[in-house]
Image (spheres, rainbow, N blue to C red):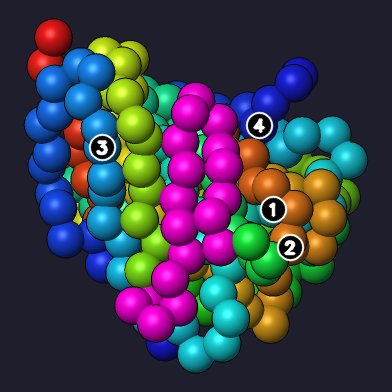
Amino acid sequence: AQSVTQPDIHITVSEGASLELRCNYSYGATPYLFWYVQSPGQGLQLLLKYFSGDTLVQGIKGFEAEFKRSQSSFNLRKPSVHWSDAAEYFCAVGGGLTGGGNKLTFGTGTQLKVEL
Amino acid sequence: GAGVSQSPRYKVAKRGQDVALRCDPISGHVSLFWYQQALGQGPEFLTYFQNEAQLDKSGLPSDRFFAERPEGSVSTLKIQRTQQEDSAVYLCASSLDRGNGEAFFGQGTRLTVV
């Protein structure tokens, strides 16, 4: 069965500092990988996704993620964090005979706090 | 509307009561998913529709949970005889194609069972 581990429950960074959120996955085939952001009271917004090809993926809001098959990781990065980035971030792996890449298994999330 | 719409946004139910949660996907979207998000957890897959066909209901936690999408657009998630452990945010998502396009999520329905 597929699974996702986000080892950091909470992370605090200063505005302007760099950010890396960790994600490790377990999946038996080539995974579809996603990062979503959730602000309070809001639905999930897709930041970026990896299906195939270039292992460095660019997303919205200046985020990027790198797929490393050897480490089963898909870490999210941003070079300079803005206060508006404070939110909860979810890594997800997708796949399945039905639902395709969008039948998602999510990690437990990382809560990001940004200090001004 | 432009996005996925869910109603009601909040629902308080007494234990044992039946509830119905509605999802209006983006017009023309083929795929529709329901997820359950418990407090402090990531969303968990409940069920998947391709048009009106429910192709996967492997995530439904018990036979008290039932979902339908009779005309291939609006979907309803029904929970019978609600229990306290059913308290969660129920998220609906839709995607244009049969599974690999971007899934757009609604804001969710927060269900509290008292």
Three-letter code for the amino acid on which mark 2 is drawn? Gly
Circle nearer the N terminus (4, 1): 4
Report, in whole angstroms, how far the alpha carbon at label 2 lies from the one at label 3: 31 Å
Q: Which residue in the protein does label 1 denote?
A: B32
Q: Nearer the viewer, mark 2 or mark 4?
A: 2
Q: Which residue in the protein does label 2 denote?
A: B99
Q: Nearer the viewer, residue B60 or A18?
A: A18
Q: Chain of mark 3?
A: A
Residue A34 in the magenta stretch? The answer is no
Q: Chain of mark 4?
A: B
Quadrant of the snapshot with the C terminus of chain A: top left
Q: Which residue in the protein does label 3 denote?
A: A19
Q: Nearer the viewer, residue B85 or A110?
A: A110
Q: Are marks 3 and 1 in contact (CB under 8 Å)?
A: no
In the rendered image, residue B22, in percent from the top left (x then y), is placed at: 60, 38
Q: Which residues are magenta?
A: A55-72
Q: Nearer the viewer, residue A62 or A101?
A: A62
